[in-house]
Image (spheres, grey):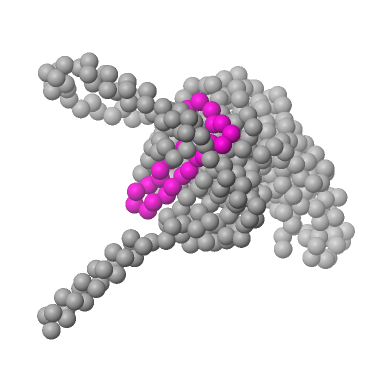
Amino acid sequence: MRFNRLFRVLIGICLFLSSHLLRAEPMLNGIGVHQELGREVFIGALFSESLSNDADTLINNIQPMRMELKIVAPDGLTTRRFSRMWIEGMAVNSKADALTAQADNMVKFDGMFKGRFLNGDFVSFTNTPGKGVDIAVNGVVLGNIKDNLFFSMLLSTWIGKIPLSSDYRDSLLKVGDVDAGLRSRFNSINPSNARVAEVKAWSEPLAAEKETKNAEIPKEVAAQERPVAKVEVPKLDVPAIEKPTLNIPAPSAPAASSIATTSSVPAKPVVVAATKPEEAEEDDGPALTAQTLLARQFYVSDAIKIIRGKTKYPQRALDRGYAGNVRVAVVIDRQGNILNTDLLEKSQYDMLNREALDAIKRSAPFPALPAEIAGARFEFTVPMRWALPE
């Protein structure tokens, strides 16, 4: 009897260990190409332990997951612009309290990347429950964010309710049903050994500097050192800003008598607006702090609410059942005046492209930039979606 009880305990332990040791590698959920101005920027892939075409399920389920991106832009991509692309995506898909709680992690994330990504570079974000998120470039781990919720916020940038690119979002939610040619192309992109060595050097200067400083401190002085109290970053002194929601007021529509009753032309279409990041002039700016990062995120959220309220569903597009996605890059001065707008992603329907630009013009001038946002110009992008309900 005693032997049987011991045997059952051993079997249970073996089953427990095998379930963890033999845990399946995350599977490919989808692959997509992210474009700007009709040019490919990167090819991205999403891997998860359990496949799903439901974005909320993937975002909210803490499981082994991985995002991989391979840079395909011929001229590369600045790392500052890359990291802030995710940071601003988090801003429009997360609540204000979550942004505040993750501010230090976002600053750490922003500081991991140096210089410029080159064509062929490979970026990965690996989420391991209980261990956080490993961020790596060309196989070189640059750091770890020990909060699994940070991965969910990163993921929401691309598959959240207000994604930076609706087409890219859809391509990541294919439940493994991906184009074989695109998968082959993705797998064929690999960095050179020389480039891997360059990326390794990104973190070496900091390590060398730390060792030098430690060597310069006499042992007797070091022994007398006492821990220094951590200085809290002052909270941003700006009005509380509600996070944009998808409960968008219905756009102006014709009277019920003039609207077709067929399912192809609904009476209450949906308009969705969101954002993306600043461009070249900001790439060489100072490193972000928790205070400046939150100032940017809250400002962009506020700008989105303004644009959303000015966006309409064009009557002719409504009558013809047109739907589509548009992304516009907006550059403003410190007073909130528009300096430039550019269509990064166009719809196949010109009337939707024009409405996107007109809605932004109707929203100007935007609020003046707060002191926490440095520079003479500020750039963000506005993805907009006109969707006909099923």
- Identify the residue at image location x=46%, y=25%: 287
Which residue is at the front of the view, 154 or 185? Answer: 185
- In front here: 117 or 320? 117
- Give coordinates of residue 34: x percent, y percent: 63, 43
Q: Is residue 216 left or right of residue 269?
A: left
Q: Which residues are drawn in magenta?
A: 113-137
Residue 289 colored in magenta in the image: no
Q: Residue furthest bottom?
A: 1
Residue 159 placement (x, y as % from top left):
57, 50
Q: Is residue 294 above or below residue 324?
A: above
Q: Tell me which secondary structure the magenta stretch mostly adopts.
A: strand
Residue 260 in the image: above or below residue 375: below
Q: Nearer the viewer, residue 189 or 228?
A: 189
Image x and y of residue 46, in percent: 53, 51
Q: How many marks?
A: 0
Which residue is located at x 59 percent, y 34 percent? Answer: 119
Tell me residue 188's x, y (percent): 57, 45
> Can residue 173 be seen from the camera position used here?
yes
Q: Which residue is at 72% across, 43% downward?
A: 326
Q: Visible in this render: residue 161?
A: no
- Viewer-nearest residue: 222 or 253: 222
Q: Quadrant of residue 40?
A: top right
Q: Quadrant of the N terminus?
A: bottom left
Image height of 103 relative to 54, above or below: above
| Drawn side of residue 234 relative to residue 195, left or right | left
Report the residue that reaches farthest toward the right. 258
Kindly identify the residue that appears in the image at 70 percent across and 24 percent down.
Answer: 339
Of the 4 image quadrants, the one containing the C terminus is bottom right
